[in-house]
Amino acid sequence: MVAKLGKPKERNLMTKRLEGMVAVITGASSGIGAGTVHRFVEEGASVVAADIQEEAGEALAGEFGESVVFIKTDVTQEEQVAAAVDLAVEKFGRLDCMFNNAGIVGVVGPIADTPTEDWDTTIAILLKGVFLGCKHAARVMIPQGSGSIISTSSTAGILGGLGSHAYTAAKHGVIGLAKSVASELSEHGVRSNAIAPGNTVTAMTATVTTGDHKKLEETAEGMASRSMLGIAGQPEDIAAAAAYLASNDARLVNGHVLVVDGGQTTSGGNNRFIKSGPGMLREAGKWDRY
C-alpha cells in the first residue's frame, strides 16, 4: 500500500454551515484545536479560542481579526473555564458550540509504577476539563434552548492498549460523560457528542512517536504506514467532524461517538499499532501538552 501523507483536498465552501454561530474551543492554540478554529471561521462561526498556551493562542487569534478572541484557560480551573464561556456570551451574544478539546498525553508507564499525583493531573486535564466545559456550556445553553457540546475522546477511549493507563481511562470517561450529558440535556434542545480521533499528526503525537514535537513529517510517515487506508490523519480531518457535529446537518445526532480513525478500531486497533503503542505502558515518565 502506498502511504498518502497529504492534507485533505481543498473544500468548496459554497454554504457556510456555521454562519452566525458562536463556539468555544479549548486546546485551541495548536493541533486539532487550531485546525478546528480555522474550519469554524471558514464556515462562518465566531470563536473563543481557549488554551493555556498564551503566545500561540494570541498569534492564532491575530490571524482572524474580530472573528476570534483568545483567552488563557487552564481547563482544570473552573473559574477559567467559566470565564471562557462568559466571554463568548459577552463578546458574541450567545454560545452555540462548546468543543472540549484540551488534552495532554500525561503520565505513562506500568500501572505499578504510576505516581498517583501524576495520574490525578492527567485525569484532571483530560476528564475534569471536559466535565467543566459541559457544566458551564449547559448553564448557557439550557436557557438558550439550543446548543451542541462536542468532546474529544480517542480510539484509546474505545480499545485498551492504544494509550497509557491514565489516558485510556480518561478517554473512556469522556465517552461516558458525553452520552450521559446527552441524556440529560436533550429535552432542552442541547446535543452532546464525542469524537474519537485515531492517529492524527500533531505536535503532541510527534512527541510521543519521535521524541520531537517538530518532526511532523516523520510522524505522518509512520502513521500512514500503520493506517488501513495508507493515510495519516490530520487536524483538518477532526475539524471537519467537529464542524459537522456543530452544524444543523447533525441535528439528529446525539449521544454519538464519531470515530475518525481510518478504520483502525475495526480490527482491534490494526495490530501493527497495538504492538508499537504500549511503549507508553513500559517506559515511565510524563509527556507535556503541545
Image (cartoon, rainbow, N blue to C red):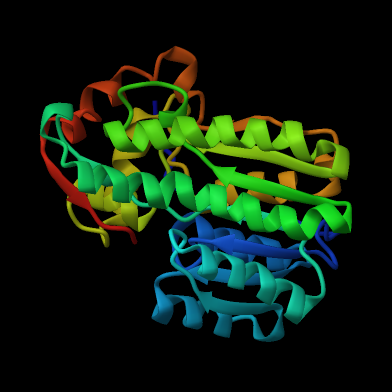
x, y percentage for residue 103?
A: 41, 52
x, y percentage for residue 51?
A: 47, 68
Q: Is residue 208 above or below residue 12?
A: above
x, y percentage for residue 133?
A: 59, 55
Which quadrant of the view contains residue 43? bottom right
Which quadrant of the view contains residue 76? bottom left
**Residue 219 or residue 44, whichever sits in front:** 44
Which quadrant of the view contains residue 37? bottom right
Q: Is residue 9 above or below residue 196?
A: below
Image quadrant where one finds the N terminus = top left
Q: Residue at x 87, y 44 (%)?
A: 189
**Residue 125 or residue 156, whichever sits in front:** 125
Give the left or right position of residue 19, taking residue 237 as reference: right
Q: Is residue 178 above or below residue 218?
A: above
Q: Residue at x 85, y 51 (%)?
A: 146
Q: Residue at x 29, y 39 (%)?
A: 222
**Residue 113 or residue 268, whichever sits in front:** 113
x, y percentage for residue 180?
A: 65, 32
Q: Is residue 209 visible?
A: no
Image quadrant where one finds the C terminus = bottom left
**Residue 41 or residue 89, whichever sits in front:** 89
Q: Is residue 70 visible?
A: yes
